[in-house]
């Protein structure tokens, strides 16, 4: 029913359940590499664990209907797989160039007996972002979980060389799209629904080569807290997840300087980069009724990097 993740060190799921977090995953041993934008999981080396063979669901999202942007690869793919295994139908938002990755995730969702909807779209424009939400709600027969996860990250060694085009694309994709999609989603979200936004450790520890990206992630934190205050009385919860260094295609399509990739994630307390599947439980928790008293929170999943 699921494809094998070659990066796993042949550990059973039970062994992974109770394992030293430092050594739980085989050392990624990341080599220097580069992909054209937007980057594909299919071409990423080594392969990260997105939960294909390791995530086990317990029915916590049975009957739910979710839209996950950036759901074709990386963190979004891991969240989509986990949601399906928890009982949700899932619509995937992704760029048209990411169709190969999206099809694989859709196949995994359908293997769980859930509905998978593939919706290619560039959410950096208001029209496309709003249409994506409405298309997802129509295809799923409703919507009660919105995961705003799509993001644009570009490493720029010299601040003065950051272009206007890059600034606009980063802000349009990372923060303005959340405004547009959340506004549109309110036409569909019933009481008990949840919105989950992907922010980053960069909101607290901005890197000098990612000032635009880090700025949008700090804005997402405030957006999350403000929207949570507005929607809580209506019975809709808004929260965020702040990943640390996670091995995804975002890193190899210009998100990091190529020469920095071999040491990616080693600055964490665990001494390694995270796998997308390690983020999935945080999103499941925030989407489920188990987090009913969690509002306006940012869950940091970053391997031990100190944050406020």
Image: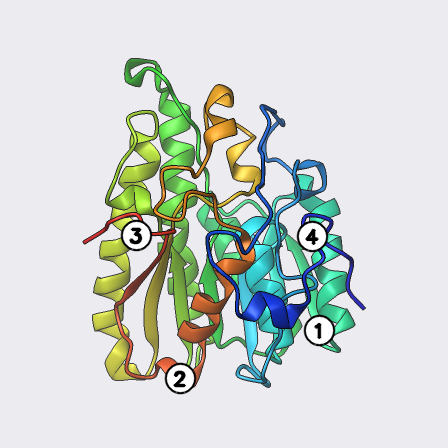
* Mark 1 or mark 4: whose residue is earlier in sequence: 4
Q: Which residue is mark 4?
A: 102
At x 35%, y 36%, the residue is: 213
The numbered mark, 2 or 4, whose residue comes first in the sequence reads: 4
Disc 2, disc 4: CB below 8 Å?
Answer: no
Residue at image point 71% right, 76% down:
114
Q: Nearer the viewer, mark 1 or mark 2?
A: 2
Residue that label 2 marks: 290
| 146 displayed left or right of 54 | left
Say whether disc 1 or disc 2 marks the residue closer to the N-terminus.
1
Residue 55 seen in render:
no
**Occupied quadrant, residue 81:** bottom right
Q: Is residue 88 above or below residue 135?
A: below
Image mark for residue 115: 1
Q: Residue 83, how many percent across, how many down?
A: 58, 71
Q: Secondary structure at mark 2?
A: helix
Q: Secondary structure at mark 3?
A: helix
Q: In front here: 29 or 15?
A: 15
Is residue 177 visible in the rendered structure shown here?
yes
Counting from the top left corner in percent of width and height, residue 23 is at: 52, 52
Classed neighbour count for the residue bearing mark 2: other residues with Cα under 10 Å, few (<14), some (14–19), many (≥20): few
Q: Can you give x and y, in whole percent of width and height, for residue 189 in the image?
A: 44, 77
Instruction: Check disc 3 and report the residue beneath it.
Output: 220
Q: Quadrant of the N terminus?
A: bottom right
């Amino acid at each position: 029913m699921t494809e094998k993740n070659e990066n796993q060190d042949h550990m059973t799921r039970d062994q992974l359940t109770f394992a030293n977090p430092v050594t739980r995953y085989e050392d990624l041993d990341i080599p220097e590499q580069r992909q054209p934008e937007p980057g594909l999981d299919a071409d990423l080396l080594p392969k990260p664990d997105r939960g294909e063979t390791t995530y086990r669901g317990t029915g916590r999202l049975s009957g739910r209907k979710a839209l996950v942007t950036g759901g074709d690869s990386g963190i979004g793919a891991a969240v989509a797989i986990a949601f399906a295994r928890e009982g949700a139908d899932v619509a995937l938002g992704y760029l048209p160039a990411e169709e190969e990755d999206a099809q694989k995730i859709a196949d995994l969702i359908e293997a769980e007996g859930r509905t998978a909807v593939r919706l290619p779209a560039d959410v950096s424009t208001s029209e496309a972002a709003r249409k994506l939400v409405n298309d997802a709600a129509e295809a799923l027969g409703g919507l009660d979980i919105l995961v705003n996860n799509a993001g644009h990250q570009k490493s720029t060694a010299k601040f003065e060389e950051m272009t206007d085009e890059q600034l606009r694309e980063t802000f349009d994709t990372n923060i303005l799209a959340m405004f547009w999609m959340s506004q549109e989603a309110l036409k569909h979200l019933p009481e008990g629904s949840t919105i989950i936004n992907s922010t980053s450790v960069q909101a607290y520890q901005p890197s000098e080569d990612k000032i635009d990206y880090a700025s949008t992630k700090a804005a997402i934190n405030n957006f999350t807290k403000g929207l949570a205050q507005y929607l809580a009385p209506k019975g809709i919860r808004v929260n965020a997840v702040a990943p640390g260094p996670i091995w995804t295609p975002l890193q190899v399509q210009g998100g990091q300087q190529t020469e920095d990739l071999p040491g990616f994630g080693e600055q964490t307390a665990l001494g390694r980069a995270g796998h997308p599947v390690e983020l999935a439980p945080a999103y499941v928790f925030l989407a489920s009724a188990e987090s009913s008293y969690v509002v306006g929170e940012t869950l940091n999943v970053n391997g031990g990097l100190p944050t406020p």
